[in-house]
Amino acid sequence: MTPTIDHLPKGWQPLAQEFVEKTEREFRGIVITNLSAKSGWLSVDIDKNTVRMQDFWRATKLCEGLSSTSWNVCVECGSHHAEQRPGHIMPICDDCLN
């Protein structure tokens, strides 16, 4: 089951789409139960019963990598030069801030 990404901030949608495609390619049958923008980063949960136990660790690391990467990706334009800024929960780049 492929999760929808339409509810995510526009700048994070390509990052999330790439993650979903890579994860589904590497782990056939995996079910992503949650893909959301939460507290300033992307959050992902997977159903551990849909992936082999030996692959669960790798899948979890991919999820953590997406969350970490999203910290520096602008939610408006997708630039990889964004930061958490005072008054903003989500990361935003200089161009979109101004």
Image (spheres, rainbow, N blue to C red):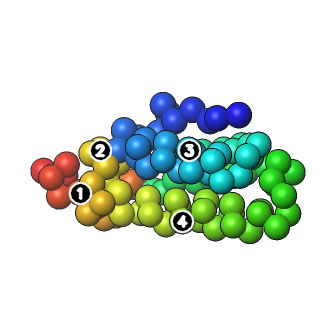
* N-term-proximal mark, 1 vs 2: 2
Q: Is residue 14 left or right of residue 77?
A: right
Residue type indicated by callout 4: Gly
Q: Nearer the viewer, residue 90 or 31?
A: 31
The residues bearing labels 2 and 3 have C-alpha atoms spaced at a distance of: 22 Å
* N-term-proximal mark, 4 vs 1: 4
| Disc 3 target residue | 21
Q: Can residue 74 be seen in this view?
A: yes
Residue type indicated by callout 1: Cys
Q: Where is residue 8 in the image (x, y as percent from the top left)?
A: 47, 39
Residue type indicated by callout 2: Glu
Q: How crowded is mark 3: few (under 14 residues within 10 Å), some or many (20 or more)?
A: few
* N-term-proximal mark, 4 vs 3: 3
| Disc 1 target residue | 93
Q: Nearer the viewer, residue 94 or 12?
A: 12
Vertical position of residue 16 compared to residue 7: above or below: below
| Disc 4 target residue | 65
Q: How crowded is mark 1: few (under 14 residues within 10 Å), some or many (20 or more)?
A: many
| Disc 2 target residue | 76
Vertical position of residue 67 compared to residue 96: above or below: below
Query: Are dots 2 and 3 in contact, CB under 8 Å?
Result: no
The residues bearing labels 4 and 2 have C-alpha atoms spaced at a distance of: 20 Å
Q: In this view, does 88 lie to the left or right of 44?
A: left
Vertical position of residue 28 compared to residue 79: above or below: above
- Which of discs 1 and 3 lies nearer the camera? The answer is 3
- Image quadrant for the N terminus? top right
Query: Are dots 4 and 3 in contact, CB under 8 Å?
Result: no
